[in-house]
Amino acid sequence: EAGAEMATFDGMTFADVHGGREILVVTTPSRCELLAKRMQERGIKPEWEVFGPQHILQDVTRLIEKGYDKPPYYINMVLGADKGFQGAMPYSHDILAAMIRMLPPQSIFCVSGIGPAQLPATTQAILLGGHVRVGLEDNNYYSRGQLATNEQLVARTVRIVKELNHEPASPAEARDILGLKAV
């Protein structure tokens, strides 16, 4: 209700395990539908956040087929969270490539790599034509033992994007890619 144009949608039930504590995040199919309907009514585009193939094939696809989003579908694949989230997948080239093949038609994808998976996962995403999320939310280190800042992680990613003969999207270009209205 704060006027968001886009919001993360985790459409699955999972257990989050941190520091010996288990937190159960319950998002049943009926709750997913209620949340998706509310987002649609408010004009909020979902960023479908998935942690494994089952989330793409079951939850995201079901909600898209019911009409709760329109193309392009923006799907963020979070890899490397397998030590903290039940049902999450580790990062590997093969896992990412397989998940990309499972995306619904007219999808664009983003990859978020957790911890040490951030650099290889996001670099592979760029090579495969995807988008990336980097920063301290997912990774606290620039390299082994060296704490990072958001600025360092973003600057490294921009450098990699340019080295691979791409250009980072401007805010206006990003809005166009996502199908959001110009401001």
Image: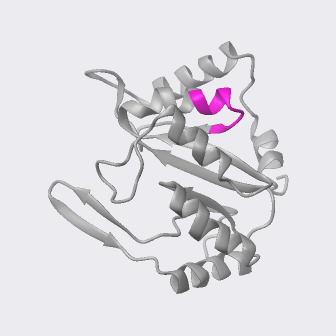
Residue 78 x, y percent position in the rendering: 49, 48
Q: Nearer the viewer, residue 4 or 95?
A: 95
Display coloring = one colour
Asked which quadrant contains residue 66, the reply is bottom right
Asked which quadrant contains residue 19, the reply is bottom left
Write the residue at 37% across / 47% down.
81
Q: Is residue 86 above or below residue 175?
A: below
Q: Farthest top residue?
A: 163
Residue 42 x, y percent position in the rendering: 71, 77
- Asked whether, in this view, residue 107 is left or right of residue 46, the answer is right
Q: Is residue 163 above or below residue 51?
A: above
Asked which quadrant contains residue 56, the reply is bottom right
- Asked whether, in this view, residue 7 is left or right of residue 18, the answer is right
Highlighted range, magenta:
124-131
Q: Nearer the viewer, residue 163 or 101?
A: 101
Residue 101 x, y percent position in the rendering: 67, 47
| The N terminus: image quadrant | bottom right
Write the residue at 54% across / 86% down.
30
Residue 144 x, y percent position in the rendering: 29, 21
